[in-house]
Image: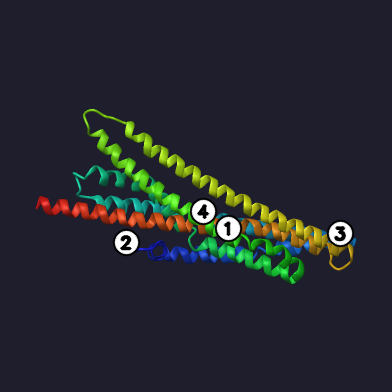
Amino acid sequence: MPRTIFAYVLQYTGKHQVGLALLSIATFLLSAAPLELQRRIINTIVEHGAFATLLWLAVTYGGVALAEQSLKLVLNIYRGWVAEDSVRSLRLRAGDSARGASASSADDTGIEIAVMLEEVEPIGGFTGVSVSEPLLQGGILTSVVGYMVYLDARLALLALLFFVPQMVFVPLLQGAINRRAQHRILTKRGMSGDIVRAATMSHQEWDWVRDPISRVFTLNMGIYKLKFTMNLLMNVMHHLSVAVALGVGGWMALEGKIEVGTVVAIVSGMGKLNDPWGDLVNWARELSVVDVKYRLYVDALDRLSASALAQARSAA
């Protein structure tokens, strides 16, 4: 097995990543078009333009939106297929690694159960978005930011300043989440082995489960608190940037320094940036967690393979 998650993605799903990348590029190329159409529609209304022009712009807006959403539908279904195919492959590989270990230790059996039933899900799921997600969301961010700067660089850059603090607190909070996620995986693996061991005893004592269950609960609550605190801070930064765009842009429109349609387009652009920025942060968060899980998965396969090989040699 490759030693890193991206090496695995490229080795086993490389040709599908090319198809996902092409769909992502086609999708983000359409991302700024609705903003320009919104700007033209608003300016046509404010300037009391021709209804035929307004109708043509509205129909075009609807067509572009339909095309963008249709591409996203195809992209998401394709991602889902790649992810599920990877999960199936990882489960089969885990089973092959343990083959021949008919009398595995309780710890090995517990690891195999944890890997087969739970741990491969997020690893396989990540393969569907590993390349296409940063390409799509990064492309949307680049297109929308470039369009906003083209409309009015001063107003756009002022609003975008609120993304800078997020580059500081997001990595710090994510690092704390990763440490808890790794401890949770190891704790649950230990629980699986203990369950197998207890099931083989004539007198089953299950009081031991209280401590690991409590540890998992504490780790999960710590992850929730960090994750939702991060989301709160990101949302606050987003709404502050929109408030600045509305306040400063509104003042500039009243002074005749900017078109009303431009203010609306920039405010809409800020709203359009929130989702891809959040999705990129989620992707980075998932990458860091899945990277830990993948390394633990590879270590587990090495352990199961070594155990099966040792038993085969002893049997011989």
Near mark 4 (Cα within 10 A), the count class, few <14, some 14-19 or many ≥20, is few
**Considering only order in the chain, which callout, 2 or 4, is on the residue closer to the N terminus?**
2
**Considering only order in the chain, which callout, 3 or 2, is on the residue closer to the N terminus?**
2
Q: Which residue is mark 4?
A: 77
**Considering only order in the chain, which callout, 1 or 4, is on the residue closer to the N terminus?**
4
**Considering only order in the chain, which callout, 3 or 1, is on the residue closer to the N terminus?**
3
Per the model, the C-alpha gap separating discs 2 and 3 is 61 Å
Disc 3 marks a residue whose amino acid type is Ile
Residue 285 percent coordinates (x, y): 51, 56
Q: Which residue is mark 3?
A: 45
Label drawn at residue 1: 2
Near mark 1 (Cα within 10 A), the count class, few <14, some 14-19 or many ≥20, is few
Q: Quadrant of residue 191?
A: top left
Near mark 3 (Cα within 10 A), the count class, few <14, some 14-19 or many ≥20, is few
Residue beneath the point at 69% across and 64% down: 160
Tag in front: 2 or 3: 2
Residue 115 percent coordinates (x, y): 34, 48
Residue beneath the point at 78% across and 63% down: 39
Per the model, the C-alpha gap separating discs 4 and 3 is 39 Å
Whether pointer 1 and pointer 3 mark residues with C-beta atoms closer than 8 Å, the reply is no
Disc 2 marks a residue whose amino acid type is Met
Per the model, the C-alpha gap separating discs 4 and 1 is 33 Å
Label drawn at residue 169: 1
Disc 1 marks a residue whose amino acid type is Phe
Disc 4 marks a residue whose amino acid type is Ile
**Considering only order in the chain, which callout, 1 or 2, is on the residue closer to the N terminus?**
2
